[in-house]
């Protein structure tokens, strides 16, 4: 019975989370503070009704960046370039919304679409790099990401900088280019609905389309896919392009939302990319689980600030917990291999 | 019972809904060769995994040398004097034979591995048991037979007194089988207890002293080899008499479905296939015989399109596919049952349904090739199709959602065969179609291949089993060192003649490998 329970696929991810929380508690204790107070503050801060607006918007961004990692993960590829793709989308959206003088009704859609195209194209470069030149996607995405971040940083500091401001930021976007808010909520916008729509599309494509099936087959056994006539190069192009497009969408939504400008570092410093990556890994790339695992990292992210305020535990503890979860999930890969090795084949 | 080296008492093990072992008793007398036989899915592999500590039984006892043991892992089993040679080798390709053999129990001098002592140890063990091997050779360069000898040496190095060999002859050439049997007999004379897991009756009769037959997770027969017959063993395995399918002979031949002209394949600067020409016509089964590693698989890869040709042309029906993609070749009318089932022929983590659907997923009834809904799949159709194939191919499973990796080898093979035959392609390439498959299923698979031919399609059958080629093929080509060295018509083909062509080749290849 116990053996059967430990084989359930949910055991490792849940175990990872529990262990991370315990390790976090030990760290807090060692610092001479009270872990129960700290965790209570995390929950309170993130689930407080007055904060829910903000919490939901963060959940949306982490879900979005979760997809950015999860889509390539379906075919066994790691996209570590989320930051670059996110920032490129943000700066593209700002340029389209502010510089082209588009009338109100089309400014926002055009900015979103342009951001998706640019980020999608940027991420897709990694596919031919892998197919033609043998550079693994995990490496090229990781190395190309800082390039995009640096380009955006240059643009916001010089050509697009707000004159007279000491901060590295653009001027505020015209009223027409603000993304539509939902009622009188401050943080949650139509952008959240778009991200939810993208998650639904990913779920349906993954489970019911031929391409989704081909991605999963390639992820499970690439040689099997090739033998059956699938083209991993093309699948990688599609997966990376879509992942980049989602990152671009998230970046655009952030820039088009309050405070309606591109601030250097503001897209990266909340850590949506790696929270999303952790959520995607915890979900094993499964589309239906990404929004669920994203809840956990949302709570850590949002609650971290209030934990710092009320329990005097630095918010970096959130990053520690996130890191522990990722390490344990990496261990799972090793354990799975062992289990596969013990598999029977008379 | 004082002579028993190992006793398994009332071993039971369930995997989800499948009862793999149901109260199995097994007594292994010291210094004997004990064959454990059974069809695929009969529970042989599970029982051996339990004995070697890889799997823990739900109930039952393991008694080694009169002492009850509970193995938490293979390390415990090794400490108790067991050694196992797996069907899939577990060796480090980039290291030498000696390094592989002593791995985990290295002779040391001053905290460093004593390489000279390791090589000496390997040499002395090899001499003692007649295991021909070069301690300094790199394992990656060795043939399957030589790798198996390394695995056996590894077990002997750790002083295994009970040696489990899981389907040891599956990867061997006829001459290698003979020398393996010599090693087995010598080890038994030396007091080692050898457990031979197999479903090949001839091997059991040739080398074992006692036989235990499993069927559906239970013991269905115990025999002393000298007092039994192959018919009796078959009955115990299958519960019925197996008829050898007789090839009804060639019908009318149609157009060529495959034409290979002067094809060469070069891999890592070594020419694997040299200037091979052959053709397969509708209504014909063309066999390729040869010792494993003589270019058969490279030729198949070239026809499928997973390996490029360095010279020559390949035509499928009317299409010249020499430089075409795998997808284009399959569309032109090609299906392939590959040799490497786990590595190439299936995704072990995916379900039976998904494995059966690949390649069919864009065609009706699963996919919709045209109009609204193009690019989408019907999961209901995929499941229905899978359950039909599960019953028509008699795939033993707890359901169509079960991952292929948890099926027994023979049942996993049936999944691959069902998928490929259902393409109804004019040309089928069948590489070792009955490997790891039990007697009853072999008969069914052979029957299906003959039906496939009778429906006016062509088959290129690559096999190491001469009996299989004789039973099915209309013509047999023999490959050696990348070339076709002999061709026999059905009327001229005989086990002796094919064997002679392969055996001459095998001797030459053997010299090359051991040099």
Image (cartoon, rainbow, N blue to C red):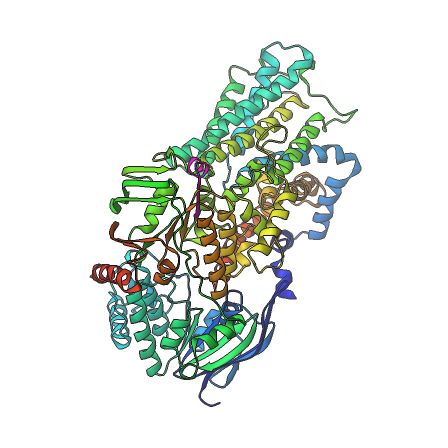
**Residue A173 seen in this snapshot:** no
**Where residue A11 sits in the image (x, y, percent)?**
63, 56
The residue located at (42%, 69%) in the rendering is B200
- Where residue A211 sits, quadrant-wise, is top right
With respect to residue B449, does B65 lie above or below?
below
The front one of B357 and A221 is B357
Whether the magenta-drawn stretch holds residue B350 is answered as no
The front one of B227 and A256 is B227
The residue located at (59%, 49%) in the rendering is B353
Q: How many numbered badges does the structure rendering display?
A: 0
Q: In the image, A325: left or right of B6? A: right
Q: Quadrant of the N terminus of chain A?
A: bottom right
Q: In the image, B215: left or right of A43? A: left
**Where residue A189 sits in the image (x, y, percent)?**
72, 26
With respect to residue A148, does B383 lie above or below?
below
- Where residue B281 sits, quadrant-wise, is top left
With respect to residue B106, does A126 lie above or below?
above
**Where residue B56 sits in the image (x, y, percent)?**
56, 70
From this viewpoint, which residue is outermost toward the bottom? B2
The front one of B272 and A99 is B272
With respect to residue B374, does A283 lie above or below?
below
The span shown in magenta is: B327-336
**Where residue B239 sits in the image (x, y, percent)?**
54, 72
Whether the magenta-drawn stretch holds residue B328 is answered as yes
From this viewpoint, which residue is outermost toward the front? B252
**Residue B445 seen in this snapshot:** yes
The front one of A167 and B114 is B114
């Amino acid at each position: 019975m116990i053996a059967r329970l430990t084989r359930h696929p949910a055991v490792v991810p849940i175990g990872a989370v529990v262990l991370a929380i315990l390790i976090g508690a030990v760290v807090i204790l060692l610092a001479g503070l009270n872990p129960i107070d700290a965790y209570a503050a995390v929950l309170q801060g993130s689930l407080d009704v007055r904060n829910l607006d903000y919490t939901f918007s963060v959940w949306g961004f982490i879900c979005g960046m979760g997809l950015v990692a999860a889509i390539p993960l379906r075919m066994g590829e790691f996209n570590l370039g989320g930051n670059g793709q996110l920032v490129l989308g943000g700066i593209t959206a700002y340029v389209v919304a502010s510089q082209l003088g588009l009338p109100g009704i089309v400014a926002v859609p055009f900015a979103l679409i342009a951001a998706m195209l640019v980020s999608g194209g940027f991420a897709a470069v990694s596919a031919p790099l892998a197919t033609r030149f043998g550079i693994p996607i995990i490496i090229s995405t990781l190395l190309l990401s800082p390039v995009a971040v640096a380009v955006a940083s240059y643009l916001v500091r010089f050509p697009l900088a707000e004159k007279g401001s000491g901060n590295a930021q653009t001027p505020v976007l015209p009223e027409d280019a603000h993304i539509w808010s939902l009622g009188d909520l401050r943080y949650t916008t139509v952008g959240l609905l778009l991200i939810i729509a993208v998650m639904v599309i990913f779920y349906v494509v993954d489970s019911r389309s031929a391409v989704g099936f081909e991605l999963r087959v390639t992820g499970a056994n690439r040689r099997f896919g090739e033998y059956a006539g699938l083209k991993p190069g093309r699948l990688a192009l599609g997966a990376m392009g879509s992942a980049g497009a989602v990152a671009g969408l998230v970046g655009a939504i952030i820039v088009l939302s309050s405070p309606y400008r591109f601030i250097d570092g503001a897209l990266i410093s909340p850590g949506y990319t790696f929270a999303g990556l952790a959520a995607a890994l915890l979900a094993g790339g499964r589309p239906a689980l990404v929004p669920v695992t994203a809840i956990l990292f949302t709570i850590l992210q949002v609650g971290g600030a209030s934990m710092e305020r009320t329990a005097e535990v630095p918010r970096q503890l959130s990053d520690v917990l996130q890191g522990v979860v990722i390490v344990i999930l990496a261990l799972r890969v090793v354990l799975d291999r062992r289990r596969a090795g013990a598999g029977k084949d008379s | 019972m004082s002579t028993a080296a190992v006793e398994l008492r009332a071993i039971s093990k369930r995997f989800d809904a499948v009862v793999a072992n149901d109260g199995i008793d097994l007594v292994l007398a010291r210094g004997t060769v004990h064959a454990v036989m059974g069809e695929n899915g009969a529970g042989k592999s599970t029982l051996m995994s339990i004995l070697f500590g890889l799997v823990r039984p739900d109930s039952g006892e393991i008694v080694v040398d009169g002492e009850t043991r509970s193995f938490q892992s293979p390390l415990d089993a090794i400490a108790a004097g067991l050694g196992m040679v797996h069907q899939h080798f577990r060796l480090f390709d980039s290291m030498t034979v000696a390094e592989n053999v002593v791995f985990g129990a290295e002779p040391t001098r001053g905290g460093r591995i004593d390489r000279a002592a390791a090589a000496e140890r390997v040499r002395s063990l090899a001499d003692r048991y007649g295991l021909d091997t070069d301690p300094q050779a790199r394992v990656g360069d060795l043939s399957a037979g030589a790798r198996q000898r390394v695995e056996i040496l590894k077990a002997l190095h750790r002083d295994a007194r009970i040696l489990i060999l899981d389907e040891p002859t599956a990867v061997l050439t006829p001459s290698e089988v003979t020398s393996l049997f010599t090693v087995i007999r010598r080890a038994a004379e030396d007091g080692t207890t050898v457990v031979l897991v197999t479903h090949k009756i001839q091997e059991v009769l040739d080398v074992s002293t006692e036989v235990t037959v499993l069927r559906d997770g239970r013991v269905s027969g115990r025999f002393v080899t000298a007092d039994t017959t192959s018919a009796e063993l078959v009955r115990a395995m299958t519960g019925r008499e197996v008829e050898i399918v007789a090839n009804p002979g060639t019908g009318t031949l149609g157009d060529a479905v495959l034409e290979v002209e002067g094809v060469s394949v070069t891999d890592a600067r070594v020419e694997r296939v040299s200037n091979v020409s052959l053709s397969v016509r509708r209504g014909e089964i063309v066999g390729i015989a040869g010792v494993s590693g003589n270019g058969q698989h490279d030729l198949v890869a070239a026809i499928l399109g997973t390996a490029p040709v360095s010279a020559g042309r390949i035509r499928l029906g009317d299409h010249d596919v020499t430089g075409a993609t795998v997808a284009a070749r399959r569309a032109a009318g090609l299906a392939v049952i590959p040799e490497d089932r786990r590595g190439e022929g299936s995704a072990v983590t995916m379900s039976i349904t998904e494995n059966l659907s690949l390649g069919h997923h864009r065609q009706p009834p699963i996919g919709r090739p045209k109009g609204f809904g193009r690019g989408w799949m019907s999961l209901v159709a995929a499941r229905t199709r899978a359950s039909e194939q599960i019953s028509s191919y008699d795939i033993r499973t707890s359901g169509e959602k079960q991952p292929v990796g948890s099926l027994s080898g023979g049942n996993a093979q049936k999944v691959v065969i069902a998928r490929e035959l259902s393409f109804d392609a004019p040309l089928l390439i069948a590489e070792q179609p009955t490997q790891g498959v039990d007697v009853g299923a072999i008969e069914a698979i052979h029957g299906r291949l003959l039906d496939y031919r009778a429906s006016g399609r062509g088959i290129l059958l690559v096999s190491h089993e001469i009996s299989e080629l004789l039973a099915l093929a209309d013509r047999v080509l023999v490959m050696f060192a990348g070339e076709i060295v002999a061709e026999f018509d059905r009327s001229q083909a005989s086990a002796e003649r094919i064997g002679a062509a392969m055996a001459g080749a095998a001797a030459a290849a053997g010299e090359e490998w051991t040099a």
